Image (cartoon, rainbow, N blue to C red):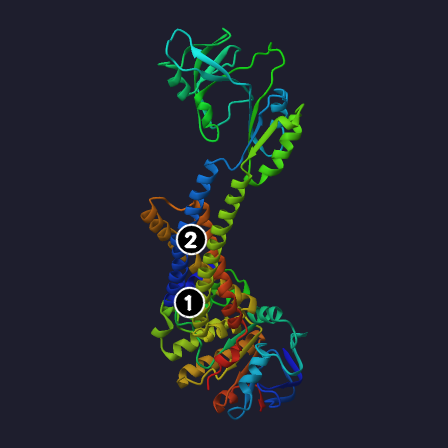
Amino acid sequence: MIEVSGLSFGYRRGEPIITGLDRVFPAGRVSGVTGRSGSGKSTLLYLLGLLLSPWTGRIVVDGEDMGGAPDRRRSRLRAERIGFVFQDAALDATRSVIDNIVEGSLYSGIPRRLAVTRAGDLMERFDVGLRASHKPGEVSGGQAQRVALCRALLNEPRIVLADEPTGNLDTETAGVVIGALVALAHGEGATVIIASHDPEVIAACDEVLGL
Amino acid sequence: MLMEAGRVARAQPVASTITVLIVAAVCGVILSTTGQTVQAEQAVLARIDDAGTRSIVVSDTEGRAGITPEAVTRIAGLSGVEWVIGLGPATDVRAIGLTGGEPVAIRILYGDIPPLVAASNWDRSPGAALVGPVAQSILGLRVPAGGVESTDGSSVAVVGWFDAADPLAHLDRSLLAAPDPQADQPVVRTIHVLAQRPDQVASLADAVLAVAGPADPTSLAVVTSEALAEIRAAVAGELGTYGRRLVLMILGAGLGLVVLNMYGAVTTRRRDFGRRRALGASRSTIITLVTLQTAITGIIGATLGTAVGSVIVWRLTDRTPDPTFTIAVGVLAVIATITAALPPALIAAHRDPVKVLRVP
């Protein structure tokens, strides 16, 4: 669960994007964040993912106030408990698909052998197993996004943050991705937060925050 | 993390190759310029040292000092003394049984034969002596064996040879005899001392005079290589300063190029660092990764550069550079490379990951 209170943030001094936000993102539910472009959807996601520090307010993750925590602690939590899914997959073009998926284990401390086993299971589950040795440039956009989903789920995160995860996908692949995220929340009790302006994605969420 | 750094280095072949080439060039240039200077410095210093920069000679010029052989033992115990010998008064001798030979000097040797005097086996029994190569020729001895006698009729057996190098080469014109324990009031007329380091010569000369315990100090003359030692220090200082300046200039230039190259490499990897940060890499992890990546290329470059530089020096001078200097150049180059990686690594670690992860 993530709880924010009095959250304010902006990229430039005097120009806040998010002001005084109070909100609970509960475990076991899919929370949607929507709004027009520039409204702060992605920014909120990155604040919740501890990649940004708020101007004011608290970000409490599973009972720990992480808003002003030092970088090392925030990074540790990100590595161990948070999974990110980006709009454009953000894969490393120089590594194979499987190496992309297990990259996070470098920072979370998961032994590589265990990471590879988990990656194999995830690739089978999301139907990209045959692409394990391919480079990202050799797979389709839909496959790349499923690989990114595998990467986000490798450390069995308690929190998944997805920024426009279906932005570049066909309807079928988008359905697979959203279905996986919903299953993660409802089946495994994870906190799933999706930033999107896609009405179909927002409709799949249990609750919606409009910015 | 080391393997990941190696993988990143391979994934950026252009940046890695440029770093390898820069570091290799730095090492190669240092070895082929300063390396030769160091060799020249060592050659000059060796020649100065050959002239006896570390020697102290105490002579009883008037014969009144009354220095006893025990003084040699006491001087040998002084700190900073590499070796010491004492020589008794010179007596003229001629070869027994040969006519026409010229007289040469024979002197009693006190103390151990120093390393720079090669000699045949000698049990140092009283009445036995070694002959120097020049003395042997003057005496007309075909082999270093036989007998010599002084003008007062006493004789000494020649039982072998010796061959002295500087600063004792003058002894080659004489014979060295073993001391006779039964001799009445033996005296030492000359003491040769070699200091362990040139800078010890001045203080050691004072200590030698004090320990020698002369009955009449005014009879003593001391000749040291202090002036030569000062010249040696000046030469070493001048050449050393020049070499150090050159090394620093080349390292500085190389360091600047590595900074620029790594800054360029880091700039093109902003998205890579953003992704890593999102996956849980801390700032210190990013700094470690960039530094290790650069260190790996630096080590490869230093190895390549020192190898090539050594070959260049060998081809130019027929001598390979001093191994210690070569290793020091390689280690310095790697340290400089790692230092050069730190500013780009800090920049990479503090880039805002969100700016590169967001899709407009």
Q: Residue furthest bottom?
A: A36
In the image, residue B191 above or below residue B355: above
Q: Secondary structure at mark 2?
A: helix
Q: Residue furthest left?
A: B315
**Residue type, mark 1 in image:** Ile
Residue B129, image x, y percentages: 48, 14
User: Which residue has dot 2 on it?
Assistant: B34
Query: Label 2 is found on which chain of the structure?
Result: B
Query: Label 1 is found on which chain of the structure?
Result: A
Q: Secondary structure at mark 1?
A: helix
Q: Nearer the viewer, residue A178 or B6?
A: B6
Residue B113, image x, y percentages: 51, 23
Which label belongs to residue A98? 1
The reply, left or right, for residue B63 in relation to residue A111 is right
Assess whether mark 2 and mark 1 are in contact (beta carbons under 8 angstroms): no
Instruction: Say which residue appears at 42% left-offset and 53% top-offset.
Output: B34
**Residue type, mark 2 in image:** Thr
The reply, left or right, for residue A19 in relation to residue A137 is right
Q: Nearer the viewer, mark 1 or mark 2?
A: 2
Mark 1 surroundings within 10 Å by alpha-carbon count, few (fewer than 14), some (14 through 19), many (20 or more):
many
Instruction: Say which residue appears at 62% left-offset and 69% top-offset.
Output: A73
Q: Nearer the viewer, residue A150 or B157?
A: B157
Q: Nearer the viewer, residue A64 or A120?
A: A64
